[in-house]
Image (cartoon, helix red, strand yellow):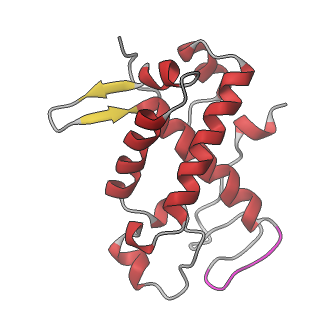
């Protein structure tokens, strides 16, 4: 039985309560998502058309530079290839729409792995087209604090 979707931005306590997680399993799920993030971030075939045309977009690619199709494919791959310890928790996030399979739990972990890495990678150093000091691209779009990594 799957649980109703949880917003990508839901906090860690909500996620733990919804999935019945332990800290150990949570860390394993974060690691599996980080491996998927790295796969997505290294393949230019995963970029949106707009990102592919932008000369400032470079590896490792950011969440908003990737196509929804590539993200969805990787979300399903994470759940399919999950370890025996994490699979039951990822399975709780599975649900089906009229279009196909989705997985809110896997999406949450993948999104958070990008948020953590992108915040860490951009802190204190600017890259052409990617200003530092907590902002990306458009200066009106702030980066976000990640409760998964910063509430301990």
Instruction: Please name whichever residue, 19 or 83, is drawn nearer the observer in this view of the structure.
Output: 83
Residue 69 falls in image quadrant: bottom left
Percent x, y of residue 58 = 56, 79
Taking the spot 71% from the left edge, 35% from the top edge, the residue there is 148
Instruction: Please name whichever residue, 66 or 150, is drawn nearer the observer in this view of the structure.
Output: 66
Taking the spot 47% from the left edge, 40% from the top edge, the residue there is 78
Taking the spot 77% from the left edge, 68% from the top edge, the residue there is 133
Percent x, y of residue 99 = 17, 38
Question: In which quadrant of the rendered image does the C terminus lie?
Answer: top right
Would you say residue 3 sits in the magenta stretch? no
Find the magenta span and give its range: 124-129
Q: Is residue 119 visible?
A: yes
- Above or below, 139 relative to 106: below
Q: Is residue 7 visible?
A: no
Instruction: Please name whichever residue, 52 or 32, is drawn nearer the observer in this view of the structure.
Output: 32
Taking the spot 54% from the left edge, 46% from the top edge, the residue there is 111
């Amino acid at each position: 039985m799957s649980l109703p979707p949880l917003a990508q931005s839901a906090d860690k306590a909500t996620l733990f309560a919804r999935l019945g997680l332990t800290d150990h399993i949570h860390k394993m799920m974060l690691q599996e998502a980080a491996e998927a993030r790295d796969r997505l971030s290294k393949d230019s075939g995963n970029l949106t058309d707009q990102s592919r045309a932008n000369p400032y977009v470079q590896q490792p690619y950011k969440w908003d530079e990737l196509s929804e199709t590539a993200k969805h494919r990787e979300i399903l791959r994470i759940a399919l290839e999950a370890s025996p310890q994490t699979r039951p928790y990822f399975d709780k996030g599975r649900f089906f729409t009229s279009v196909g399979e989705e997985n809110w739990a896997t999406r949450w972990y993948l999104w958070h792995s990008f948020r953590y890495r992108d915040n860490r990678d951009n802190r204190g150093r600017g890259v052409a087209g990617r200003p530092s000091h907590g902002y990306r691209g458009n200066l009106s779009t702030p980066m976000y604090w990640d409760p998964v990594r910063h509430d301990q």
